[in-house]
Structures are given as C-alpha cells and as structure tokens.
Amino acid sequence: MTYFPYRVDQSFSFSFQYREICSYVNIDITNSILLYGPSGTGKSFAVQSLSSKYKTKVGTSTNHSRINPIIRTIFQDEIEFSIPKPIQRFEILKFCAMDLNLEKDVNLKEINDRCHGYIAADVAALCRMALEQCDIRSIQQTAEPGNLLISNEDFQKGFQNIRISSLQEKASVKKVDSVKWSDIGGLDYVKRTLEESVIWIYKHFDAFQRLGIKASKGVLLYGPPGTGKTLLAKAVATESSAHFMPISIPELIKSEVGESEKAIANIFRIAIQCSPCIIFLDELEAIFGNRDSSGFLGKKLVSQLLLELDGLNAVDQGVVILAATNNPEVIDTSLLRPGRLDRHVYIKPPTSEERISILKVLGNRMNFAQDMNLEEIALKTEHYTGADLKSLIQKAAFLAFKRYRHNKSITEKYICYDDVLEAIKKFKCSVSIDQLEQYQRFSKSLK
Ligand SMILES: Nc1ncnc2c1ncn2[C@@H]1O[C@H](COP(=O)(O)OP(=O)(O)OP(=O)(O)O)[C@@H](O)[C@H]1O
Ligand SMILES: [Mg+2]
C-alpha cells in the first residue's frame, strides 16, 4: 500500500496524450518534437516514456512563444499539452485511480465532474490526498495504514485541500466554493433558464449541431444587490460538468498599455482550449469604472470583449459567457445586442413563496425551534432580498444567544419565532422601492 502515492505521482501523465504522441512517432513524420503547455500537464513524463522506446529529439517548454525562433526551427513538430477536456480528464482520473482500492460507492464520474480546471498533476494530487486521508483513518482505526478502502469522504477532504495549478495563474481564475441548486431558495425560472442557455449547449452538443441551433453566446444576470446572482453562478459551476472560469475583473485592469486587451484575449484562448467552458464575469459594471481615467481603459476592454465575443462560435467551440451586475444601466449597450450577451435575466427580490423556500434553505444550517412560522415571516418581509433574509436570521440567532445567556437554566439552543419577530423590528432592508422601480424600468427598456 505504501508505494501507491509514488506510483500515482509517476502516472500523472495519461494514456490519451501519450497515445497521441506515439502515433506521431509511429507514422514517422518527425524525429524531433517540441512539447509545450502548462506545467503539470505531463510533458516530462511523456519524454521519459518516449526516450526508452524511440530515438527522438524532444524539447519541452511551458512558454514556447519565448523560445528563440532559430531554436524552434530545429524541431520538426510542436505538440501542445493543454488543459484536458472533461472526457480526457476522466481518462486521467481512471488511470490515476487504477491501483487505488476504492469503496464500491465511489463514483469516479461524479468526482471528475468536480475537477473544473484540473490538469493531470492536479488529478494525481487529488488521488494522492484521498489515499492519505484513507491512511490516516486506517491508522486511527487499526494502528497501521492500508487496511481500509478509499471512501467518498476521503475524496471530499482531498477537494478541500487541493489548490489547482495552471488555470488559476493563467487567467485570473478564482476558486469557487461548491453551491448546489438545492442551496438556492426560489428562483426556479432562473435556474431553468441557466440550465437551458448555459448547460444544454454542451450537454446536448450533438443535437444542437444537428439541428443547427444558434445558441446564445452569453447570459447577463442583473438585479439588486444580494438577490443571489453570484450564488447562481457558483451553482452553475458546481452543477455543470464544464470548466468554470470566474474572472476577477479588477485584475484585468492593468496599467501597461495593451496588457488588459491581451489578458482578455488570453481568457478566451484558454476557454476555447479547455472547452466546454463557462466564462463568468462577475460585477461586470467594474469594467466601466466611474472615473474618467478608467473610462478610457473601460472602452478598450469593452472593444476587446466585443471582438472576442463576435469571433466566438458558442456551439462549435463550447464556450459560453455568464455575466452578472447590479448596475445594468452603466453597461455599454453594444455588449447586450443580439449575438453577444443577448439573454438578459432579471433577478428580482423574492416573492413571498420564494422567501419561504429561502428561509427553509437557511434553516438547514441553523436550528429553528418547533414554533417557527416561516409563512408568517415571509409575509412580514416584503422587499427583502435573499441576502437580507440571511442577515435577518443571523441577527435572530444572536438575539437567541443573548436570551440563552441571560436565562442560564435552558440548555437547548434554538432560534425561536419571537427572536425573528424581534429582529424584523430593527431590520432595514437593503433595496428601496425607488431602486426597485429603476430595475423594473430597465427590464422594460430591454424588451
Ligand atoms: N435565493 C437565495 N437562496 C439562498 N440564499 C440566498 C439567496 N439569495 C441570496 N442568498 C444569500 O445571500 C448571499 C449574497 O448573495 P449573492 O452574493 O449571490 O448576491 P448578488 O446578487 O451577487 O449581489 P451583488 O449584486 O451585490 O453581487 C448569498 O451568499 C446567500 O447566502
Ligand atoms: Mg454578486
């Protein structure tokens, strides 16, 4: 058992890329190859495997554009080692897990679906971490490693500890916490729209192509702060098996001339390379800044974004854009025209039915007392957003805590209906009616 980590590490290169290279070599079209791509994609491993079997000159590089062109001409061929697509990644995962003793209910397909943006080395590291967790359990229970099978929990712990390498540095990508559709109360219509316009595009790729469906390239979620726009995007990341690239817009704003445009072009290049991929631009209004100086840069960023959007073929290339903003009025209207971010979804504050669902979701994480009346609370919280409801319940929890501290005889700790009623008295919801009317007007202007 102890040699597994070593073997998993060794095998982080994977069969499909290796096969591809061998087929090049076998058909004898080249005897010198340059392998390039992000670190950890398996270049060196491929070299090791090749050198024992074939007489070839092989060079590797993580940034081939910086190699002297004269040196590049020495190589007859160049092969790009890119970030694997989900199907390829599944092959890598199966390869890495081949020698692991897994419990029956460990579902590699589900694990693969959670590995957004992982390269081969990351997949190998995940397997190694799951094995380590399993060994820790084994030592605790049987005083020695290797006596237990690797469980789903072990993989979960692995996910918590892993830092994915290449995609992160390359395109200002942040790590997304896992949010399920069921963690979001209400918003059923929005969930359906996202499923149709963002997830179907690659889930039903063949049918879309056969029927010649021109899918939308992008969806804009807009609405008041705290209505769950970012939360919805995180759920799309968790629930879809595509890569998810959340872009930090402030990081795109670079001071050197031309660097920002390059950064945007780079994002699209990587997205196409590792399709299917969803590019998420949160707080889109940040591109536009509000000072004159950033206004100029904002315009350049927008024109680069338009250029990339217009050049994109969403269905063929498997890349869709998801954007969110709470200030849709400052967004350049050229971005919202047909063929660009042309699906617009207004995320309103929840209806009273939806407030009940949100309170139920919040209740899963907090202890509500038996007397809690969610229907009544929903009626008393008109115009509250999801975020408002969350902070209301937080306040109620604090009041409950104070009450229990005051009355030392009670040991159970629950949030009672009265705590919430007390909290409502002091609560001011974050979006005013005026603001809501403004969003309403904007949504009408788009139709
Ligand atoms: N429908 C909902 N169901 C459950 N929780 C919600 C819901 N809407 C909002 N929340 C809670 O409010 C928090 C803030 O929501 P989120 O960050 O998604 O708002 P947003 O619309 O992106 O706001 P902003 O426009 O300010 O970026 C969430 O993390 C979540 O805890
Ligand atoms: Mg947000």
Image (cartoon, rainbow, N blue to C red):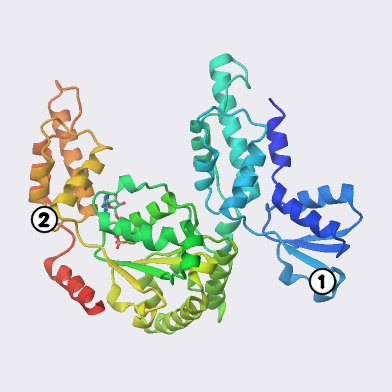
Q: Secondary structure at mark 2?
A: loop
Residue 152 visible somewhere in the drawing: yes
Residue at the disc numbered 1: 72
Q: Left or right: 326 with respect to 70?
A: left
Q: Nearer the viewer, residue 394 or 112?
A: 112
Q: Is residue 118 at all visible to an observer of this figure?
A: no
Q: Residues within 10 Å of mark 2 (few under 14, many from 20)?
A: some
Q: Residue 384: x percent and y percent?
A: 16, 55
Left or right: 155, with 73 as reference point: left
**Left or right: where 294 falls relative to 223:** right
The residue located at (17%, 29%) in the rendering is 405
Q: Which mark is residue 382?
A: 2
Q: Amino acid at mark 1?
A: Arg
Q: Which mark is residue 89?
A: none
Vertical placement of residue 447 versus 407, above or below? below
Q: Earlier in the sequence, mark 1 or mark 2?
A: 1
Position in image of residue 311 (x %, y %): 52, 78
Foreground pick, 303 / 408: 303
**Rounded to the nearest whole Å, what is the CA distance between mark 1 and mark 2?**
66 Å
User: SS at mark 1?
Assistant: helix
The residue depicted at 43 percent of the width and 54 percent of the height is 237
Q: Quadrant of ligand 2?
A: bottom left
**Residue 344 image offset from top left, x and y in percent:** 31, 70
Please state the horizontal and vertical placement of residue 157, each as a whole percent of the image: 50, 36
Relative height, residue 133 to residue 274 (above, below):
above
The amino acid beneath tag 2 is Glu
